[in-house]
Image (spheres, rainbow, N blue to C red):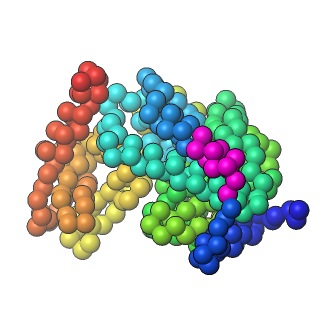
Amino acid sequence: MTTKKLNTLVDDIYKKLSALGEGKSLNLSDEVIDQFGEDMKEVLRHWSNPRPRDKETLRMSNIGRPNRQLWFDMKTEAQAQPMPPATFIKFLYGHMLEEVILLLVKLAGHKVSDEQKEVKVKGVQGHMDCVIDGEVIDIKTASGFAFKKFRDGTLREDDTFGYLAQLAGYEAGHGTSGGGFLAMNKESGELALYLPEELDKPNIESKITTVKKSLKNETPPELCYQPIPDGVSGNMKLPRGCTYCRHKIECHKDSNNGKGLRVFQYARGLSYLTRVVKQPKVQEITNAFKKSKANKKTRKSTGV
């Protein structure tokens, strides 16, 4: 049997699946089908029974986040906005799609090993997705917008969630350095293999040292991202990287001359303004937004 090369992975998957377009069977064995069923059962078990956490801890999955976000994660967990139910739905189908991707890799004849192997670097633990053809590969499912970063190799320019540091940690713990990401566009099913250059990855040991040092401080580090102009109005708003953060209200409580973030409902979604010079001609929902978040935190703390 010919040994497959990592750089042909996506083409090999597409070639395998082309048989379906020709009306041919993939001839999956009962063993393969049964194993996939067991893998899906395991996904459902883990998703439906999350581990209780009194507070956030440093892990490979979050070590690449900005230092200020990590500070709030560790120091002010009780004040954080709870995750909405829809987020847990995203978690479920994300984990399910990861198993689908691994199935496709195996069907294409590539070697998969070390699934969910635990690694540790300077006291920070994590579970890497797998090793494919001898290299650490992190499986990612992404929106059409985020997928472009993997397909075009531009992740280093906008790595909001710290994926490169996550990969560097897994590689350091496993003892390899030529890995990358196998990503799926959730909207189209398109796949992309992205193997970043070594210089694009952070020095993970240095990163961990810096993060641990910042967590010893009683005040948070500098802002992760600076506010950006909201068109030509003179208003300033949170950049994309901040809008996803559940600490944005507490983090930017000094904005708008100490009144905090102001939230406006646009057709395209919410906009979080840190400075309002010109009143937007859309509905302001600041009070309702903050009240909703406060109610969710109350229900979370009381268990109601």
Q: Is residue 35 magenta?
A: yes
Q: Where residue 107 appears, x then y in whole percent?
A: 70, 59
| Magenta span main SS | helix
Q: Where residue 62 appears, x then y in whole percent?
A: 54, 42
- Give residue 174's quadrant in the image: top right
- Give residue 205's quadrant in the image: top right
Q: Nearer the viewer, residue 263 or 190?
A: 190
Q: Residue at x 60, y 57 (%)?
A: 101
Q: Residue at x 66, y 40 (%)?
A: 116
Q: Residue at x 44, y 33 (%)?
A: 48
Q: Is residue 211 visible?
A: no
Quarter the C terminus occupies:
top left
Position above or below: 201 against 213: below
Position above or below: 262 against 82: below
Q: Where residue 286 appears, x then y in whole percent?
A: 16, 48
Q: Nearer the viewer, residue 211 or 108?
A: 108
Task: Determine whether, in the image, residue 104 is placed left or right of residue 279.
Answer: right
Q: Nearer the viewer, residue 268 or 117?
A: 117
Quarter the N terminus occupies:
bottom right
Outermost residue toward the bottom in this view: 22
Q: Is residue 157 magenta?
A: no
Q: Where residue 120 appears, x then y in whole percent?
A: 70, 34
The region drawn magenta spans 28-39
